[in-house]
Image: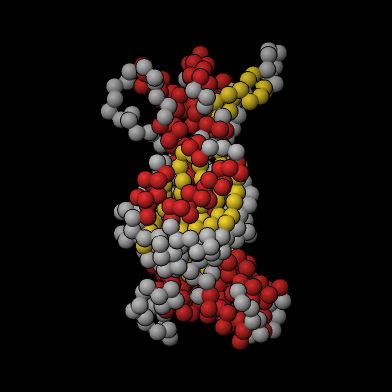
Amino acid sequence: MQSHQGETQAHQGDTRAHQGDTRAHQGDTPAHPGQTRAQPGTRGRPGTPSLLRELNDRAALGLLLDGAMLTRSQISEYTGVSKVTVSQMLTRLEDRGLVAIAGEQAGGRGPNAALYSVVPSSAYAAGLYVESDLVSAAVADVTGRRVAEVSRNPNGADDPVELVRGTIEQACASAGIEVTRLSTLVIGSPGVVDPRTGDPRLAVNLPSWHEGALDALKSAWHKPVVIENDVNLAAMAERADGAAAGADDFVLVWLGVGLGLATILGGRLHRGTAGAAGEIGYLPVHGAPLHTDIKHPASGGFQSLAGGLAVRELAAKHGFAAPIPAEAVRAAVSARGDGEAGAFLSELADRVAVGVASVCVVLDPGLVVLGGEVGRAGGTALADRVATAVASICPSRPRVVPTGVSGVPGEPVLRGAMLAALGQARAALLASVADPQ
């Protein structure tokens, strides 16, 4: 998880979520297509015709939520039920406004087969990324297509409810939809999130985000709301289609003004009992003071070695002074690592390797993704140096790569929030499919 300093965020591009039950506060990363879980309310019920109809309808809807357009024959093949039953299933789903004919598929001698798809407007979801100086939001329909993206400066506003409400209203107005059409909202923010309550805590640069904030948002929203650590969401995005696409074991090391870590093991996000797993900025390191004031954003040992301020000072020593750490790293990379540029990148890599090696000797993840503003700016030039340095100080030899998600600042976090929100919206849509009788 990220330490208590974040990066200003912007965003763009489409969000194409994976199908499944993404429960941000119960440990799952977004599931892969086709892994639709059994829905609540079906266990222990007798195999009545109404239940069988419900299960069949959910199976068909689940297939279409994966994003494909399918014929009745294809749905019959995938679900194992007859074409007659599939026709009945599709009729019920059409009557509920969940699926519709989207085209035709040319066949043999007979008439073209109708292609069915999910109705995009059957559900909407929103993702937000909240930082002290910027709030980014995106709204997507149930297919994952973004229909609105907005950014705004909070201008000192410290009421979470009003901040979220204003941003969401702006995004929905941009999309031309009513706020009430949203099914769920996932918010990414820096700091520790209590896995038991879902409340943020120890978010130093967002003092108004504290215990009770989640309940206040739910009361005002009257919809499911989830608050998740920003680095955890970025890791979800990396696993969806970034540098860790499909990987079940990897860590995302966030290098920015603050430091953070997200850990995916066996395809599941590890948070720890207090939600503080990944607060790598507090990692004690040799040569750095052992601070006890954990509420200060720059008090950790590893933070003092490789955090934003340390990177700026190191860059200036090598002739790459810049007000923003990532700018200095980007300038050194542009210089192709020659002379002082190479010396700066190598020394920075040695510092980063101290934290990465500490993680690898415990978890041995095999893959390390360098994210955050500094990790993205360093690219392969920094990642390759970190891999060499890690291999020289610990028995683990992980593959180290830069982030593979869009280079737009904040996009990994916002994309992860959208993935989580869409997963919940789709699960709710599947759960809503019940026989009306």
List x then y, in percent, for residue 69.
60, 29
Where 401 falls versus 93 (above or below)? below
List x then y, in percent, for residue 337.
68, 77
Where 433 falls versus 242 (above or below)? above
Instruction: Name the residue rendered at 59%, 51% in the picture.
Output: 150
User: Is residue 99 left or right of 21 when viewed as pictured?
Assistant: right
Instruction: Name the residue rendered at 61%, 23% in the picture.
Output: 101
User: Is residue 7 left or right of 327 when viewed as pictured?
Assistant: left
Residue 246 shows in this picture? no
Residue 334 shows in this picture? yes
Query: How many numbered markers are drawn?
Result: 0
Instruction: Name the residue rendered at 36%, 74% in the picture.
Output: 294
Q: Quadrant of the C terminus?
A: top left
Instruction: Name the residue rendered at 53%, 62% in the picture.
Output: 155
Q: Quadrant of the N terminus?
A: bottom left
Observer-nearest residue: 199 or 59? 199
List x then y, in percent, for residue 192.
39, 62
Where 97 falls versus 244 (above or below)? above
Where 117 falls versus 124 (above or below)? above
What colouring does the structure picture have? secondary structure
Observer-nearest residue: 149 or 357? 149
On the image, which quarter does residue 136 sit in? bottom right
List x then y, in percent, for residue 332.
67, 76
On the image, which quarter does residue 288 sit in? bottom left
